[in-house]
Amino acid sequence: MHFFCLIFSFLNFFAPTDSTIIVQEIHIVGNQKTKENIILRELDFAVSDTLQTKDLTKLLELNRRKIFNTNLFNSVEIKSEIKNNYLIINIIVQEQWYILGYPVFDIADRNLNEWWQRGHQFNRTIYGFSLSHNNLRGRAEKLSLYLISGFIQRADVSYRIPYIDKSQRTGIDMRVSYATNNNLAYSTFNDTLAYRKSDDILQKRFFARIAIRKRYHFYDNHSLELRYNANQIADTIARLNPNYFLENRTYQKYFQLTYYFNYDFRDNAPYPLRGNRYELIVSKLGIFSNDDINLIDISATYSGYKQLGRKVFFQTVLEGKISSPNNQPFFNTRGLGYQNDLVRGYELYAIDGQAYIYARNTIKYELLNTKARLKFLKIKQFSTIPIALYPNIYADAGYVSNNFTERNRSNLANKWLAGIGVGLDLVTYYNVVMRFNYVLNQKNERGFVFNIGREF
């Protein structure tokens, strides 16, 4: 009798219990172009795996987010069905329209407010054509062609293969770009970019790069990029700013090696509300003895997102950068005011420096989050438009360190900056985010700021 009880206990120990469940089937619906392995790669479970029942809801939601954050789908839904301790999973996706060709019309300045202050003239715009395929061969490969003219003339082609190995951990990224300028920012004075215009070409820029990307786990990505840069300016620019390339040079050629690390655990990459992200970039400009520059640049960013209430969210972004040596070419020196690295309220300023730090803090409220259905549109990728509205308040602070303020008569470097404001974010499909802000900075300057972009 004791022998049979022992056998029963032994078998029961290895048998699935009420707290576990076995994945029996995984079905994917709606992927007309995307290969199944591209979707299955994002899952941290597979057929025959044993899962904890108490963690099932959270696990499926985390995996839904990962699939959505590939930026291949307009929507992702995961449904589960339990039959006799076995789990059947259905993944329903709506694919995006992957071939995007559209005319380009944009301002040449750093933001709309700067363009408006400089006279909002048509000759400070860029226009052209962009063509991309964001899911080539159904393997999440991206091929892009970018041709623009106007304030800047540029031709750009890039090709990204996310996975080149069977384990789907290693990818490759290639890009070639050539650009010319007849209108060029040659320096900053009083923290404002100074431009020179000419009928002749004032600057030529060329670069070619190749990057190897490695993904060891679901949320982290590493890349190592080798890049060749060849830049040239007219004699006029070198006379106006001898430090543009340093030592009155009119050319600059060098190789660059960059390591990039990204840990991304956000619920929605285009417009996150929960989670966090860590980024580290280490760049060495000039890796051979005959390169025309020798500079190292290191930046680190933390982005945190937290839900405070039912519809209230908090967001913080902390970033710092250091570079060496102190004496750097103007062309390669970047402080605050470029791209998204800024203290809100100082959108009109470009504050150069060898190091900086800033913090941006936002509290937002989800006023609206719905989907509008346009029945007259027969193309399903465009017939459903997500619309979300987030009124918000924010407070920013930052500091730029510049060891050569006499070169550009900077009034904002080497002192703390602060800005506050209120805003409204409109989020819609294909990662388009429109921001309407009213800002006030430490100089008691105030005004409206509008920004529109496609974010990832």
Image: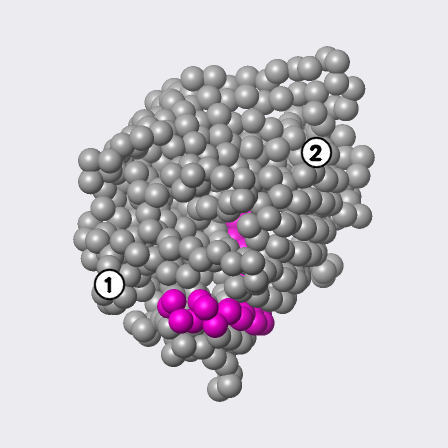
Magenta span includes 146: no
Residue that sits furthest to the front in the current view: 199
Q: Could you tell me which residue is drawn at 58 percent across and 22 percent down?
A: 386
Write down the quadrant of residue 167 in the picture.
Answer: bottom right
**Residue 101 rendering spot, x and y as whole percentages:** 72, 40
Evaluate whether residue 12 shows in this view: no
Read off the magenta span. Answer: 218-241
SS label for mark 1? helix
Q: Could you tell me which residue is drawn at 47 percent across and 79 percent down?
A: 292
Magenta span includes 232: yes
Write down the quadrant of residue 68 in the picture.
Answer: top right
Contact (Cβ within 8 Å) of mark 2 with mark 1: no
Residue situated in front as seen by the camera: 187 or 135? 187
Q: Is residue 219 above or below residue 430?
A: below
Query: Which quadrant would the N terminus be assigned to in this image?
Result: top right
**Which residue position is annotated with label 2?**
96
**Residue 33 rendering spot, x and y as whole percentages:** 79, 39
Q: CA distance from mark 2 to mark 1?
A: 48 Å
Query: Which quadrant would the C terminus be assigned to in this image?
Result: top right
Q: Classify 10 Å Cα crowding around label 2: few (below 14), some (14-19), many (20 and above).
A: some
Residue situated in front as seen by the camera: 57 or 122? 122
N-terminal label among 2 and 1:
2
**Residue 387 rendering spot, x and y as whole percentages:** 55, 21
**Which residue position is annotated with label 1?**
405
Q: Could you tell me which residue is drawn at 72 percent across and 61 percent down?
A: 165
Q: Amino acid at mark 2?
A: Gln
Q: Is residue 301 above or below residue 406?
A: above
**Mark whose residue sits in front, 2 or 1:** 1
Evaluate whether residue 310 shows in this view: yes
Q: Is residue 123 above or below residue 327?
A: above
Q: Amino acid at mark 1?
A: Thr
